[in-house]
Image (tube, rainbow, N blue to C red):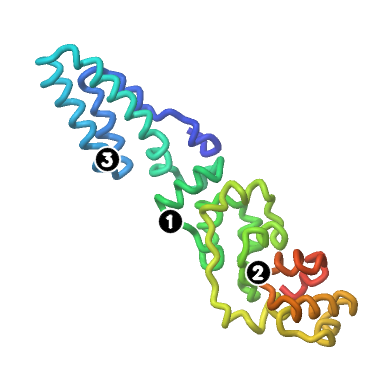
Amino acid sequence: MSKLNWFEQIPSWIWVSLIPVFGGVAHIYAGWKGKKNIWILWGSCFILGSIVLGSLFPQLSFLIWTGQVTTAFVFRKEFLIATAPKGVLIPSAKIALLMAEKKGQIDINQCTKDEMVYDLGLSIIYANDIELLRNEGYIFTDIDELSEVVGIPESVLRRIEPLIVFRYDVNKEMEVSWRRLNSFSVEQLVAHDIQQLHAEKIVAERSNRGTYQSLIDVRKRTGIPIDVYRHLV
């Protein structure tokens, strides 16, 4: 099955669950493959229930079979998440949230390039840019920065947002990157190629309402485009 439509497939073991009496083998297989012992228990119960209860009370056979098939389809999505291959396309934020609950979130400030490409599904180009920025001292604090600074489409970021977490040590960042907007005077900002008018607005807003929390916060509060101070990253 293609990685592009991995979560749309119906695993072959689900069709096995349609077999009366012994269809519970499908649940046992899915539980083994997805590391879910409770599914193995369900499968065993369906087989034993079909054999024992079905023979004593034939009228229950259909109910047991219905439960067997229904639970198989209920398990489908979680099975696909548990067995998703590296680099699979994450189709929605809902799937990303389930994956985060199953496998944990990924710290964009600490993760490897492989994790960016194979776990988040980002292109190698974006992964290289993120790594380059981190090596130069930039620390991401907001999902919007990945769009504004790196250029990742918002549609992509909204799909994978639940999988991403931002952790950082502010003390390591105070003298580098955009954090200088929280400490530089107007004269220092001008010396770093920011126009006088913009520099005055940045400092005035900071003085009135406190330090900036991210590049996005600077843009929202001052209205000054990120391109004006992007070179401080």
Tell me the quarter of the picture where residue 222 sits. bottom right
Q: Are marks 2 and 3 in contact (CB under 8 Å)?
A: no
- SS type, badge 2: helix
Provide the residue designation for mark 2: 133
- SS type, badge 3: helix
Q: Earlier in the sequence, mark 3 or mark 1?
A: 3
The amino acid type of the residue labelled 3 equals: Trp
In the image, farthest residue toward the top: 58
The amino acid type of the residue labelled 1 equals: Gly
Give the side of residue 128 with respect to residue 57, left or right. right
The C terminus, quarter of image: bottom right
Residue 123 versus residue 95: which sits nearer the camera? 95
Provide the residue designation for mark 3: 32
Q: Residues within 10 Å of mark 3 (few under 14, many from 20)?
A: some
Residue 164 versus residue 208: which sits nearer the camera? 208
Badge number at residue 71? none
Q: Position of residue 209 (x, y in %)?
A: 72, 76
Alpha carbon separation for disc pair 2 and 3: 42 Å
